[in-house]
Amino acid sequence: MADKTPDTQGDKPLFRRLWVLCLIVFIDMVGFGVIIPSQPFWTKSFGATAFEIALVMSVYSACQFVFAFPLGWLSDRVGRKPILLFSLLGSVVSFTLVGLADSLLMIVLARALGGAMSANIAVAYAYVADVTGGEERARAMGLLGASIGAGFVLGPFIGGVVAGPDPANPGQIAFFVGAAISAFALIAAIPLLKEPVSHRSSAETGGFRARLRGFGLALSIPIVLIPIAVAGIAGLAMAGLEATYALWVNEEHGWGARETGLFFGYIGVLLVIVQGGLVGPVTRAIGERGMLYLGLAFVTAGMAVVAVSDTIPLVFVNGALIACGYGFIDPAVSSLISRNTPAGRQGAIMGVLQSVGSLARIVGPAAAGLLFHELGHNAPYVAGAGVVAFALAFAWWRLAGVEMPPSPRARTRAAAEAPPEPQAEVRAEARSPPR
C-alpha cells in the first residue's frame, strides 16, 4: 500500500508539499534532455534518413499523447506514486535500450516506450491538483512547469558535455547517463514521495472527457480560439526545428552532438533570461497582444536567418531570435487565454492548449524531416518562417481592435484604488421619509 501524506498536508506551505515532486520531475527531465543532442546522430549511424530521424521524435510524442489518458486513469485507481515510480523505471529501460540498440527498429521501439513513460507528466499535474486547491493551484502548476522547463534547459547542456566529439561517432554514453539520472530520480522517489490522501479524478484534471469538454468550451469562446490556434501553428514550426536542427548544423557547419548540446544550453539560458526578466517589462510596455506579435516576428526572422546562416555568428543570431520569440509567445498566449476564459473553466481550456501542443509535436517533426530529406536542409526553416509569418498575420487580423477584459492584476489594483462607498449617506437616505 502506497504511503499517504498526512491529513494536515493542506496546512503546509506550498513548497513543502511539492518540493519532492518538483525535484523528481526536474531530475527526470534532465535525464530526458541529456539524450537530445546525441539522438539524431546515433539514429543516423544506423543509416536513417532525415525523415526517419525526425519520425522517431514524432513516434515519441504520439506515444506520450496516447498514454497520458490510460496512465491518468490507472493513477486514479492504484495511486499517483505507483504510476510515477513505474514510469520512471520505464524511462530507465528506454534509455538503456536506445544505448544498446543494434538496429533502427530497436531505437524506434525504445523511444516509443520512452514516450509512453513520459506521459507521467500528466500524473504529476494530477498529483499537484490532489494536494492544492483554490488560488494556490495555479501557483503550484507554475512551480511544476518551472521544474520541467529547468530540466529541459540543463539536460541538453549536460548531454553536450558528455557527448563524444566526433560527429560521425557520437557514442552511446549520453543514453546511459540519461538512464542513470532517471534511476536516481526513481531511487529518490521511493522513500521521499508520499501518496496524496485523496485523488481528484483524472477525468477532472486532464482526462479524455475533460479534453473534449475543453474543446467544446473553446469553440464557444472565439477570442480564446485565436491564441490557441496561433500557439499550435508556431508549435509546428518549433517542433520541426527541434527535430532537424542538429542535422542542419552538422551539414552546414560540421557540428556534432557536443557542439549541438552546448548550443541548446545557450538557447535555454536565453529563454530563462527572457521569461524571467523581460516578459514583465515588455507586457507593461506593449501588452500581451503586442508581446505575442513581437514573439511571432522574432521567430519568423529567426527561422529565415537559419536558411542563410553560413557563418557561426549567424547561427547564434538565429538561436537568439528564436529563443526570444518563443520566450515571449508562451506567456502571451497563456495570459490571453486566462484573461478571456471564465474563472471556473481555466483548467479545461489550458488542457486544450496542451493537447494542441502535443499534436504539433507529433506532426511538426515528421513534416520537417520530410522537407529536409526531399527538398534540402534549408527547406524546413523556409517553410517554418512562412508558417509563423502566417500565424502573425492571422493574430494581427483577428486580435487587432478587440477589446480585452482587464487583467486580474489590473482588476485588483482598480478595486484597491476605488473610493469607499458612502455607506453612512446611503443609510441616512434610506431612513428619510418620502416627501
Image: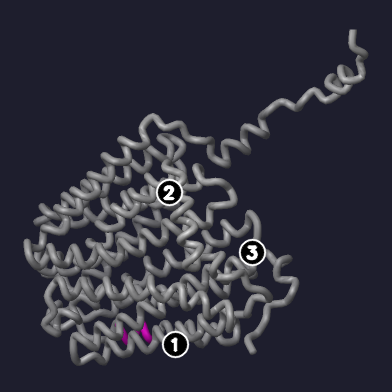
The reply to whether callout 3 and callout 1 are in contact (CB within 8 Å) is no
- Determine if residue 314 is in view: no
In front of the other: 26 or 85: 85
Residue indicated by mark 3 = 132
Q: List the single residue furthest toward the top.
A: 435
User: Per the image, is 61 magenta?
Assistant: no
Q: Counting residues from the N terminus, which is met first, the one under dot 2 or under dot 3? A: 3
Please say if 400 is above or below 61: above
Q: Secondary structure at mark 1?
A: helix
Residue drawn where x is 17% and y is 73% of the image: 256
The magenta span reads 175-179
Residue at horizontal 7%, vertical 65%? Answer: 374
Give the position of the N terminus as an image quadrant: bottom right
Residue at the far left: name it: 375
Q: Which residue is mark 1?
A: 89
Q: Is residue 177 magenta?
A: yes
For mark 2, what is the residue? 219
